């Protein structure tokens, strides 16, 4: 999960609210108008990524996700800040969160990546697991745990994929481990910035970024 910059709301949301529409009555064209700025928010390089797990979302795939489920609060059905782009997996993220397999959670406690900086809450380890950061205050600890559990961010497939990417990053470091020690902190930071940039188009980018910066 990474920090997102939310663009302005599409005008169609105001129109849908004005006419008292429900989500089931939204046309395909209207959904495209809603999805377009969500895709802009979810783009990194030339690829789309899930706003929750950072897996790659293929063009015209994924779904418009209500962070607070429509069944929980219909008043938020067309509220722009409640809409995200999620992958289509049933094992984690949006579909899992609101399924019968999901855990009970308070939507207010889930990290909103367009408002909160997930880096302040979540630590992605080279093992592929994600855990609450050490030293969080109780409220932030609860939010981090709620987010991980509600979205099932430690789903085995996600853990395995993130661990594989971390192994790639570790291999790059081992290639020039001896020379790194001779670098100044500034030069080391520049080197790592270049390595991070090399993974910019990869899924699960936060795992690699935290590995280089914090590992």
Image: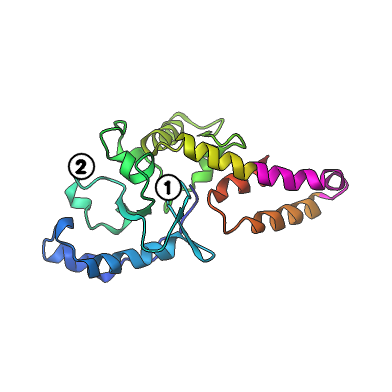
User: Residue 72: which numbered mark, if any?
Assistant: 2
Compared across the picture, whether 23 is left or right of 185 comes to left
Q: Is residue 39 magenta?
A: no
Q: Residue furthest left?
A: 20
Answer yes or no: is residue 199 visible: yes
Give how far apart the Cα atoms at labels 2 and 1 are. 20 Å
Compared across the picture, whether 176 is left or right of 209 comes to right
Badge 2 crowding class, 10 Å Cα cut-off, few under 14, some 14 to 19, many 20 or more, is: few
Compared across the picture, whether 61 is left or right of 209 comes to left
Q: Position of residue 17 (x, y in %)?
A: 17, 62
Position above or below: 120 against 190 = above
| Quarter of the figure with the C terminus | top right
Foreground pick, 139 / 38 = 38
Say which residue appears at 75% left-offset and 45% top-offset.
Answer: 173
User: Residue 197: which numbered mark, if any?
Assistant: none
Span of residues in magenta: 167-184
Compared across the picture, whether 51 is left or right of 180 comes to left
- Residue 39: quadrant of the picture: bottom left
Foreground pick, 214 / 62 = 62
Say which residue appears at 45% left-offset and 35% top-offset.
Answer: 155
Q: Is residue 180 magenta?
A: yes
**Circle 2/circle 1 CB separation < 8 Å:** no
Badge 1 crowding class, 10 Å Cα cut-off, few under 14, some 14 to 19, many 20 or more, is: many
- Mark 1, residue position: 52
Foreground pick, 74 / 168 = 168
């Amino acid at each position: 999960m990474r920090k997102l910059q939310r663009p302005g709301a599409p005008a169609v949301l105001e129109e849908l609210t004005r006419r008292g529409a429900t989500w089931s009555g939204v046309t395909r064209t209207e959904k495209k108008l809603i999805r377009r700025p969500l895709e802009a928010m979810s783009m990194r390089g030339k690829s789309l990524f899930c706003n929750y797990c950072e897996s790659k979302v293929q063009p015209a795939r994924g779904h418009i996700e209500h962070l607070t489920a429509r069944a929980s609060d219909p008043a938020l059905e067309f509220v722009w800040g409640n809409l995200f782009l999620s992958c289509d997996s049933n094992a984690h993220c949006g579909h899992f969160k609101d399924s019968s397999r999901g855990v009970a959670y308070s939507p207010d406690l889930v990290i909103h990546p367009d408002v909160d900086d997930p880096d302040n809450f979540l630590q992605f380890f080279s093992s592929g697991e994600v855990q609450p950061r050490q030293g969080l205050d109780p409220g932030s600890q609860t939010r981090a745990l709620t987010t991980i559990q509600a979205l099932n961010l430690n789903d085995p497939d996600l853990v395995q994929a993130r661990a594989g990417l971390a192994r790639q990053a570790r291999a790059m470091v081992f290639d020039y481990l001896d020379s790194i020690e001779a670098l100044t902190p500034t030069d080391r930071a520049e080197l790592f910035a270049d390595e991070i940039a090399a993974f910019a188009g990869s899924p699960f980018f936060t795992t690699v970024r935290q590995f280089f910066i914090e590992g």
